[in-house]
Image (tube, helix red, strand yellow):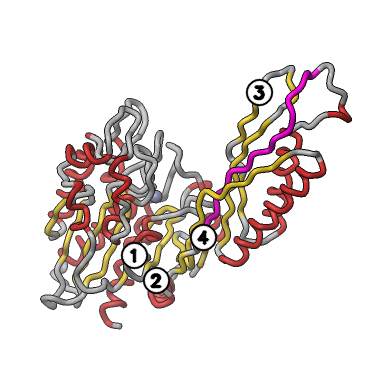
Amino acid sequence: MERLDILGTLSQEAGRLTRSYASESMRRANEHVAGWMRAAGMAVRQDNVGNLRGRFEGSRVGGPTLLVGSHLDSVRDAGKYDGPLGVIVAIEVVQRFHDSAKRLPFALELLAFADEEGLRFGSTYLGSAALAGTFDAADLDRIDADGISMRAAMRRFGGDPDRIGGDRWTAARPLGYLEVHIEQGPVLESRGAPVGIVSAIAGQNRYVLTFKGEAGHAGTVPMDRRRDALVAAAQFVLAVETEARTLPGLVATVGQVAVQPGATNVVPGEVTVSLDVRHPGDSERVAAARRLLEGAAYMAKRRNIHLNTRQLSESATVPCSPNLVATLSQAVRELGHPVVELASGAGHDAVAMSALTDVAMLFVRCKGGVSHNPAESVETADVGVAIDVLGRALELLATA
Ligand SMILES: [Zn+2]
């Protein structure tokens, strides 16, 4: 917990925690974490994208490797635990094996990813994508708010952007990737469980919808002659909520609304809204998104509003490995805690890592389900449980 407090002070903004990719605060975070990794018996290096990699050799030379990790970057005005908790818990587990001179039949590679949140360049899973071999070289041309390219930022951080392909995992297929993370939701708290096992990371579809009506004078256009784009969009927003409250497992959000011309005395002529649809089941998510878009078209037509719909992204649900889920569940059960399985509505590095290997995640209960907020909070005892569970899970994998 002291280590998480230390990382919580490493920020590029005074008075709040903001630690973006390849920043000076990230450099200092990497220095601290590298020191803790070395103290736990790991050989440490930083790769080109800026991930910190700590390697703890197993008893068999040339044996397989199990990957464990999370990210060290943050959102703006962040809490201390989203990301760093998974790194610190993993270091503590390795420390225990190191202290007891116990060697596993596989090597552990601990990954502290340089960028998951994408605050600086609007990219997601940058660090884990480089390792999984799905890094898009076009991202190197992205520019931050100060006009610095990702290429330049990476170079300044000590990496070689032209050798990013060298960050890709090329050794034998890893045994899997395990990630500990705060839940960022209220399920574990309501179930009275310190930790939970993630069954799947929900897929998501994102859209932008533009409702085009006709702007007019708020005092002179009669109500029955209006083509008010905002009223149509408002009806759509309510329909999104109704759909998501009706179908179990579905979450759907309109998070952005832009009204044109946006004046008190003008009937709204054009409204653009975003739509984010998530469900752990791919077919349910796709069907729900289709229903919502069909509903929007129907509502718009009835109001004589032109609707334009554009899909921004679609990502499939990532199921966690049944074998790794069973191992984590057994560890939780043996340690006397309730076994709670839950889907993750948020994306994580495990999504990118699933392109490389089997993945699984252990969630840690957090206060009120609050995250991406300085009020983010976890209990010390729950973090202790996460360390015990991860350690036990590794022992179970060693005997499997
Ligand atoms: Zn995170």
N-terminal of the two: label 2 or label 3? 3
Q: Is residue 137 above or below residue 287?
A: above
Question: Of residues 49 and 95, which is closer to you in this image?
Answer: 49
Q: Nearer the viewer, mark 3 or mark 1?
A: 3
Q: Which residue is mark 3?
A: 262
Q: Residue 268's image quarter?
A: top right
For the residues labelled 3 and 4, say whether their Cβ atoms are less than 8 Å apart.
no
Secondary element at image label 1: strand
Q: Residue 334's image quarter?
A: bottom left
Q: Which residue is mark 4?
A: 202
For the residues labelled 2 and 1, say whether their Cβ atoms are less than 8 Å apart.
yes
| Left or right for 74, reference 291 | left
- Mark 2 surroundings within 10 Å by alpha-carbon count, few (fewer than 14), some (14 through 19), many (20 or more): many
* Distance between mark 2 and mark 3 Cα atoms: 52 Å
- Mark 1 surroundings within 10 Å by alpha-carbon count, few (fewer than 14), some (14 through 19), many (20 or more): many
| Left or right for 185, reference 47 | right
Q: Is residue 333 above or below residue 178?
A: below
